[in-house]
Amino acid sequence: MKLLQLLGIFSLLSVLAIGGGTAVLPEMKALVTGQEGWGIDDAQFRDIYAIGQLAPGPNMLMVIAIGNKVAGFPGALVAFLAFFAPACVIAIVTSRIWNRFEGSQWRLAIQRGMAPIVVGLMLAGTIAIARTAIVGKNSQICLAFAAVVFIALYFGKKMNPALLILAGGLMGLVFLR
Amino acid sequence: MSELEAPAPARVGILEIFLTFLAIGATSFGGGVVAYLRSSLVTKKQWLDDEGFLAALEISQALPGLNATNMSVIVGDRLRGLPGAVAGFLGITLPGAIIVFVLALFYANNSGNDAVNAVLKGVGAASVGLLLAVTLQIGHKQLEHRLDMAIVAVTLVLVSFVHVPLLYVLLVVGPIAVLLYRPHKLTPDTSGLDKKPLD
């Protein structure tokens, strides 16, 4: 039963993930924390997101941690396949026919029109994580962490994001216990 | 028969595809996977030229799914068909997938641990800064008109504050945005052969 739920929710999220992982985060958070039987609250969703950040590769591999929490290894496997397979199939099929639309002005219009939607969705994804990560009694310290990372990355173009994320973890160990 | 893409270079082995994407998957930390992909696929392996890379990236971005995994299956498919696509996908996801799974097991067994919670809280907070920076950088690169800003704002408000399900946002805002950028508004025809009346 839980495996079927994982299959349904993550394959839906897969085809909705236009603009990538961050864009689908608000919907993922709403669906995952809204499943009564799954027992994942906001704080756990944030922890699982953080686990995705600590691993190499796409941070949306966090779906494996969600699947594992819900139904152990089979859950992890189902969440992984359900979240990635539909989008991959769509990508392969589309790339095989994409050149037929080369130079089509509608193709440009679609790219042009979807770009701001993706940015809006990514901002919404940022807010969704912020609402789980910058809360509680230490919210001001958390906000300071976020601000420092933002400034370092946005204004210091050559900063390594992975090091800043690790630094966030270490600072958390010092200031957020 | 469909017209096929530019012919792939000399036949590449499935194992080589897997190992190449495995290296990318194991070393691309903290986002920015596009830079890793380009350096590996275009510069080192020369499986694609810059134009081919951008074409594949354009498709990856326009479709559902992550850039990294979409690129892995598109490039793998072009090199060796479906087996190549599977090899590319498994390569780019396996290192992270295994590490996420191990971390998830560790987390499940230590969910009451203060130190573990503190580290994850710190990572979560830092991630917010990272997400905002990445989003604004993409926004600056791709958006120019006031209309863009309006579409960004509408999307954001619908998702974050009105909590409209993503499916409806995409089905409603998507077609409207594409129509607003419909061809004759986007690129005025300069040849003079196909003049359309202005709105």
Image: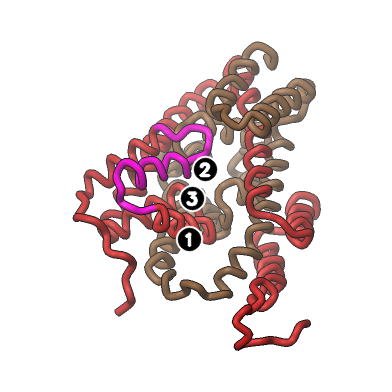
- Which mark is nearer the camera, 1 or 2? 1
Find disc 2 in the rendering and name its residue.
A60
Earlier along the polypeptide chain: callout 3 or callout 1? 1
Q: The red chain is which one?
A: B
Q: Disc 3 residue type?
A: Asn
Are the residues flagged by discs 3 and 2 from a single subunit?
Answer: no
> Label 1: few (<14), some or many (≥20) within 10 Å?
many
Report the side of B8 relative to A155 (left or right): left
Find disc 3 in the rendering and name its residue.
B67
> Label 3: few (<14), some or many (≥20) within 10 Å?
many
For the N terminus of chain B, give its image quadrant. bottom left
At 63% from the left and 47% from the top, the residue drawn is B138
Where residue B70 appears, x then y in whole percent?
44, 54
**In this picture, is B28 found above or below A31?**
above
For the C terminus of chain B, give its image quadrant. bottom right
* Residue B83 in view, yes or no: yes
Where residue A73 appears, x then y in whole percent?
41, 39
Q: Which contiguous range is marked in magenta?
A: B27-49
Kindly report the distance in space between the C-alpha atoms of the residues bearing marks 1 and 2.
19 Å
Q: Which residue of the protein is positioned furthest toward the front in this rendering?
A: B191
* Residue B93 in view, yes or no: no
